[in-house]
Image (tube, rainbow, N blue to C red):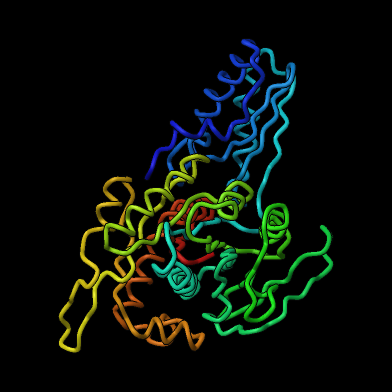
Amino acid sequence: MVHNSTSSHQQLQASPHDPLIIARQEEVVQLLKQIIEPTLKNDIVSLGMVRNLRIVDDYVYLRLYIGSRQQQLEAEIKTVLSLLSWCKKAYIQVCTIPGVKTTLAISSGKGGVGKSTTAVNLATALKVSGAKVGLLDADVYGPNVPQMLGLGKSEVQVIDTPNGQRFLPLQAYGIKVMSVGLLAEPDRPLAWRGPVLHKIITQFIHEVEWGELDYLLIDLPPGTGDAQITIVQESPICGVILVTTPQQVAVSDVRRNIYMFRQVGVPVLGIIENMSYFINSSGEQTSIFGTGGGQKLADELKAPLLGEVPIDPRICKGGDTGEPVILADPHSTTSQVFVQIAAALDATFFSMLNAQMATSSGNSIKIGDR
């Protein structure tokens, strides 16, 4: 797990150059650092969950970015801030996606490393494991997820809800799917810039009727531009999974990508090395793009190497036909790698929850029962 305490303060809004305000803000930060998010085992400041912290007179204002499974953190913040003798009241704006327990970003430093393919197959593997899964294709430069899941030119519906109008996600293989590509004209580029791009991305994060989800995976655009920064800043992402290939050029690009996540304190939950090796007809493995890039990156970040995905023509075929390899050939080596990655994520985010439920009910609950 990456500890981002050295950069997390950059998301806490700068205060006026008043020594009293600065001292009070530091006092608040130190109290908030006492609150540990139990699953990720780090404090909520270092995890980038506390943002836009302001001290105005004797009042504290902040935004708290959480998933639906972390609602208790608001009460914990109020409890620790009540220790401040000068604070009359703390105003906490909870920023979450209703019904979504865990939001994860899938990111890469450059295009062409198989990020979207990884996101699709990982979402499918999580669904097969029994999870309720949503997939948001936020890659404004190459939104390919609808084709990879066989949705083609499906139209997005807008429905009325008690909270206003919302996009209704499509469904493919039981996965709820939303993509910026569904709003574009066929074979036309998404030529969105500046405020328009920001508005559209924000709508896709906050104005989709996802319902109850265990996981929402967000397929980010490659690189570190405005679109990526907007998504990371506006959504309650609790961690990122980085996709790379073995060669050092790809790893170097991922390092630059990591810097963006450190700026907002979002931890790297793990590395997936795609195109790791090729298996020939005799079962022998050949490392076409070199070896060790993913492991080296994992060692640097002190984050796990979640899996090494082989070069497999069935992955390409699945992307073209709209049937992920997990479903087309569930017993293949490639499919089993994704199944193992999904199991590792499931163990991280639900083992503690299941243990708590088992203790309270007196019954044994297995991972995957939700």
> In front here: 368 or 363?
368
| Residue 205 horizontal side relative to residue 123, left or right | right
Residue 157 in the image: x percent, y percent? 76, 75
Q: Using the image as rendered, state which of residue 227 and residue 137 is in the foreground.
A: 227
Image coordinates for residue 186, horizontal then vertical, percent = 66, 81
Q: How many marks?
A: 0
Q: In which quarter of the image is residue 149?
A: bottom right
Residue 73 against residue 210 in the figure, above or below:
above
Name the residue located 55 percent from the left edge and 25 percent from the top edge.
Answer: 29
- Residue at 38%, 54% in the rendered image: 253
Instruction: Identify which residue, 343 or 235, lies in the foreground.
Output: 235
Image coordinates of residue 355 in percent, x first then y, are: 45, 53
Can residue 69 be seen here? The reply is no
Q: In which quarter of the image is the N terminus?
A: top left
- The residue that appears at 41% across and 66% down in the rendered structure is 342
Say whether residue 280 is left or right of residue 90.
left
Residue 327, compared with residue 54, is above or below; it is below
Which part of the image, by quadrant, shows the C terminus?
bottom right
Q: Residue furthest top?
A: 19
Q: In this view, does 244 lie above or below 74?
A: below
Query: Can you see residue 4?
Result: yes
Determine the residue positioned at 20% across, 71% down: 287
Q: Is residue 211 left or right of residue 174?
A: right
Q: Could you say where residue 88 lies in the image, as x and y percent from the top left?
A: 74, 19
